[in-house]
Image: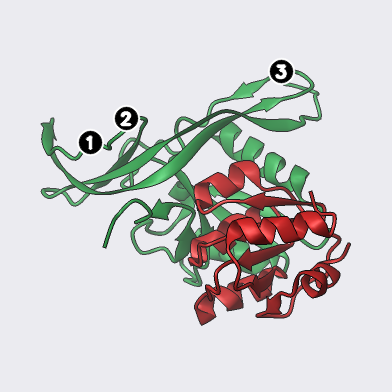
Amino acid sequence: MKVSELAEKTGLDSLNEYKDKEVEGVYISDMVSDIITGAKANGILVTLQTHKSLIAAANLVDVAAVVFVRGKKPAEDVVELATKAGIGLFVTDVDTWSFAMKLNKVGIK
Amino acid sequence: MSTCNHQWSMVNIRSGYLVVEGCHRCKARSSFFSTEPVPPVDDYQDGEHFWTYLGSSQAVKFDLACNDCGELVSLDDMMGLMLSTCRDPSCEVARIAEREGKGTWVYVALCADSTHASGKCVSERGIKALTEYFNGNIKDPDKRIIVVPCIKCESIDTCQGVVIADTGLTEIY
């Protein structure tokens, strides 16, 4: 499933232009130092964190897209960096658990 | 010299705190990794330095091991990674990014001593393994990672970049 298809199926709001990659997994973390040890290439990262260092970590491990839960929105410079890296940024109003359930429902495990 | 086409994995992953100290006499900065439940904040004298606690952030340390030949590369000398956004033409790191162009991302491996007074930084072996590890896991054909030691920065105190660290995560405002 492509990122765009996943966004549509789970009702995500897009914040930028991105490379529409094939999603290969999911990782949930609010610690950027944890992301580089746990997240995988072409994965979706679900987080509460909106700091720029999150994008530096996501880019290093080639994450396809980041989903900010509970309506959190990053600053403009964070969006700019993600766009340059081709990482899709999305927002959902629901909490992490509820979004994880949505991912499971559409077959992302 | 090894002929193995290394397939690196992260090993010895441990969580703790990256503690940064400064010497108020010579303005040097030093950092170390602590696995204590609460990071140490005491001031102390060590030779000519008077170290004062400047701050800490939650961090993760790891080493790299080859799945094929078993070679282990210790990254004890690396305190963190920073995505370089430096544009200073006098800085070698900025020149590398400029030369490599679009699609190449330069990450600076930060060592413990900002002054590099001893001439030491993150080991060449560590830098090579880190570069191979991160590129080996990338699936985007248009993306490439270059890891460089912080000794290549014109000045690590003024070099522009985004440090991968959880600064402030455990603070309550």
Front residue (pair A95, B69)? A95
Mark 3 is surrounded, within 10 Å at the Cα level, by few (under 14), some (14 to 19) or many (20 or more) other residues, namely few
The residue identified by callout 1 is: B40
**Mark 2 vs mark 3: same chain?**
yes
Residue at x-position 72% and y-position 21%: B1
Q: Position of residue B149 (x, y in %)?
A: 51, 46
Q: Nearer the viewer, residue A36 or B95?
A: A36
Going by the numbered disc 1, the residue's amino acid type is Pro
Q: Is residue B15 visible?
A: yes
Observer-side mark, 2 or 3, equals 2
Q: Determine the residue positioned at 46% across, 30% down.
A: B76
Q: Reply above or below: A25 against B72.
A: below
Q: In the drawing, does residue B94 fall left or right of residue B10?
A: left
Q: Write down the chain letter for disc 1.
A: B
Question: What subunit carries mark 3?
Answer: B
Q: Which chain is green?
A: B
**Element type at mark 2:** loop
Q: Which chain is red?
A: A
Give me the C-alpha separation between circle 2 and circle 1.
8 Å
Q: Secondary structure at mark 1?
A: loop
A61 lies left or right of A42: left
CA separation, marks 2 and 3?
Answer: 30 Å
The residue that appears at 37% across and 58% down in the rendered structure is B155
Q: Which label belongs to residue B36?
A: 2
Tell me how far mark 3 sits from mark 1, CA to CA: 35 Å
Q: Position of residue B141 (x, y in %)?
A: 84, 58
Q: Name the residue tied to disc 3.
A: B70
